Image: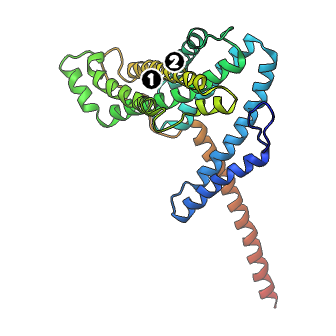
Amino acid sequence: MDSPSGGSTHLTWTNVALGFSFIVFDSAVSHLFRLGVGSSLITAGVRCVVQLAVMALVLQKIFEAQNPWGVAGLACLLNLLATFEVVVNKMKRRFHRMFPIVLFGMVIGTIPVAIIGAHFAMSIRPFWKPDQFIPIVGMLCGNTISAVVVSISFVLKEMQENRDRVETYLAFGASRFEACKPVATEALRLALTPTINQMSVLGIISIPGMMTGAILGGSSVQQAARLQMVIMFMITAATALGSIVTTVLAMGIVVDAEHRIRSERIDGRKHAIWRGRDRAVGAVVGGIERGWEKVRGRERAERESLLTQA
């Protein structure tokens, strides 16, 4: 690793490989203690390398183009990928029309906050300046994912496992808003608690990543601290908006306008993509096993034929 005169840190792929050794160490510890997460760690680490490398290539082109439509397209793509991550990879339970609802919540939570924060709180002119706006949207998406997953997971869990309480409220004449309010309130509280905890320890216990990156990039400590403050407040707003919108819309799907809990709209199976993958893998493995059995059967038949001739 060398340091150019500009003061920023320059890393090579050798440095990345050395950093990846920490993942290998964690995987070895998992194998030693039989934690069962070793392969997941390696897979996540490889995904991290590939995804960031591809994103770096895309961002470089967009930064050079300085095109607002390219920035808008990438911001929408980030929200689309974040929605895919929530619906396909993060959720154990899903509900009817989940993808458009989560996408709407992600966009409402991230794009307005990014535009207002970049233009007014961070004084970026123009607000869509690629090298600043895109990283802001990315950070907001990443944090909103966690909040949305927590809130929706709690709602669907309560509607499946503790539906009697909500049905009791409905039976006594409560509207679906009144019956679902305790569940929604607890879901939003759980969704926002990690962000509140993170904000409360900044600067005392931990030095946040955005501030660290700004300092390593050559900014003054004071500017880096103020930048982190603004970013943290924006993250709080985005997670609140995203989780509120998705929670309210999810409750509207699970409890219909006739004040009935529609449990059939909740699906606890794996996503169709992973079910298809499992079927395809099972078919391939089954085909290999059947082929191997045929080969072994022919070998046994040949041996028996030779023994008979002898």
For residue 245, which quarter of the picture?
top left
Q: Marks 2 and 1: CB-CB under 8 Å?
A: yes
- For the residues labelled 2 and 1, the Cα–Cα distance comes to 8 Å
Determine whether 307 is above or below 1 in the image: below
Q: What secondary structure is found at the residue carrying circle 2?
A: helix
Is 151 in front, or is 255? 151
For residue 52, which quarter of the picture?
top right
Q: Residue at x 24, y 32 (%)?
A: 164
Q: Position of residue 97 (x, y in %)?
A: 50, 23
Instruction: First in sequence, mark 2 or 1: give its number.
Output: 2
Q: Amino acid at mark 2?
A: Gly
Is 146 in front, or is 203? 203
Looking at the image, which residue sits at the far left?
172
Is 9 in front, or is 256? 9
Is 96 in front, or is 239? 239
Q: What secondary structure is found at the residue carrying circle 1?
A: helix
Determine whether 180 is above or below 9 in the image: above
Relative to residue 192, is residue 166 drawn left or right? left
Quadrant of the rendering where the N terminus is positioned: top right
Q: Amino acid at mark 1?
A: Ser
Relative to residue 13, is residue 259 drawn left or right? left
Q: Position of residue 104 (x, y in %)?
A: 53, 17
Reading the image, the residue beneath label 2 is 109
| Residue 83 seen in the figure | no
Relative to residue 202, is residue 68 drawn left or right? right
Q: Residue at x 45, y 33 (%)?
A: 198
| Residue 242 seen in the figure | yes
Reading the image, the residue beneath label 1 is 243
Quadrant of the rendering where the C terminus is positioned: bottom right
